[in-house]
Image: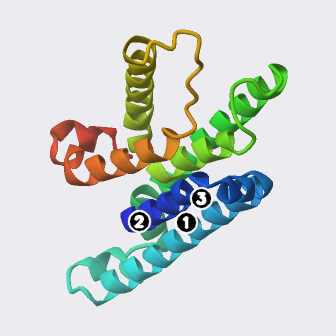
């Protein structure tokens, strides 16, 4: 899932760097978001099926499958808890973010986000997964503060508003990579997982 998430985010990042790509993201933002969500959950379904087949041929783990156990054990303990739950949680959080971002943006006359930016942020939250979304928000705020400090004190542009547009995707890629190759080695990581 790490490679699929990073590939999707790199495609979104590449599209957001050109005017034509931003136009494409803006015009088809809902379709792109829904397509990615469907693709991820389809991929997770395939992973669950492969996990079942793998367990069925293993001499020890076959006892966790029918006829030795109810199929509910596999559905809940393996398919749900280990495969689907991290992305269901991050999907729900991305929907909450999307609703709040679009609501505030509409209330304040499109002042906060570009028309595709809320969807890019929601997509980044979704692809980060659970519990990576926690670190995603931490690093997003930290990165935004650093950019603000740089613009205000180094570039001396006090009145300039710095958008989050170009931070959503790179921070998501960074968080996915550090969670896979660094954070997962710590004890607290297992406590945060579902």
Q: Nearer the viewer, residue 52 or 185?
A: 185
Which residue, given by chain and number where applicable, does mark 2 sit on?
1
- Marks 1 and 3 sit apart, C-alpha to C-alpha, by 20 Å
- Exactly how many numbered labels are in the figure? 3
Q: Which mark is residue 40?
A: 1
Q: Nearer the viewer, residue 110 or 189?
A: 110
Residue 61, horizontal then vertical, whole percent: 26, 77
Q: Residue at x 61, y 63 (%)?
A: 36
Q: Which mark is residue 15?
A: 3
Q: Secondary structure at mark 3?
A: helix
10 Å neighbourhood of mark 2: few (<14), some, or many (≥20)? few
Viewer-nearest of discs 1 and 3: 3
- Residue contact at pointers 2 and 1, CB within 8 angstroms: yes
Sequence-wise first label, 1 or 3: 3
Q: Is residue 81 above or below residue 119?
A: below
Q: Secondary structure at mark 2?
A: loop
């Amino acid at each position: 899932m790490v490679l699929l998430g990073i590939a999707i985010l790199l495609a979104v990042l590449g599209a957001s760097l050109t005017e034509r790509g931003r136009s494409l993201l803006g015009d088809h933002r809902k379709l792109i978001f829904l397509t990615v969500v469907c693709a991820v959950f389809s991929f997770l379904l395939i992973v669950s099926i492969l996990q079942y087949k793998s367990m069925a041929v293993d001499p020890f783990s076959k006892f966790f499958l029918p006829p030795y156990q109810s199929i509910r054990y596999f559905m809940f303990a393996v398919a749900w808890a280990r495969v689907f739950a991290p992305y269901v949680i991050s999907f729900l959080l991305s929907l909450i973010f999307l609703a709040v971002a679009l609501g505030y943006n509409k209330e304040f006359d499109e002042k906060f986000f570009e028309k595709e930016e809320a969807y890019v942020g929601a997509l980044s939250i979704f692809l980060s997964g659970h519990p990576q979304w926690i670190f995603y928000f931490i690093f997003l705020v930290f990165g935004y503060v650093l950019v603000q400090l740089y613009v205000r004190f180094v570039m001396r542009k006090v009145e300039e508003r710095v958008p989050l547009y170009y931070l959503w995707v790179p921070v998501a890629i960074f968080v996915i990579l550090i969670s896979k190759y660094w954070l997962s080695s710590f004890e607290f990581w297992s406590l945060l997982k579902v």
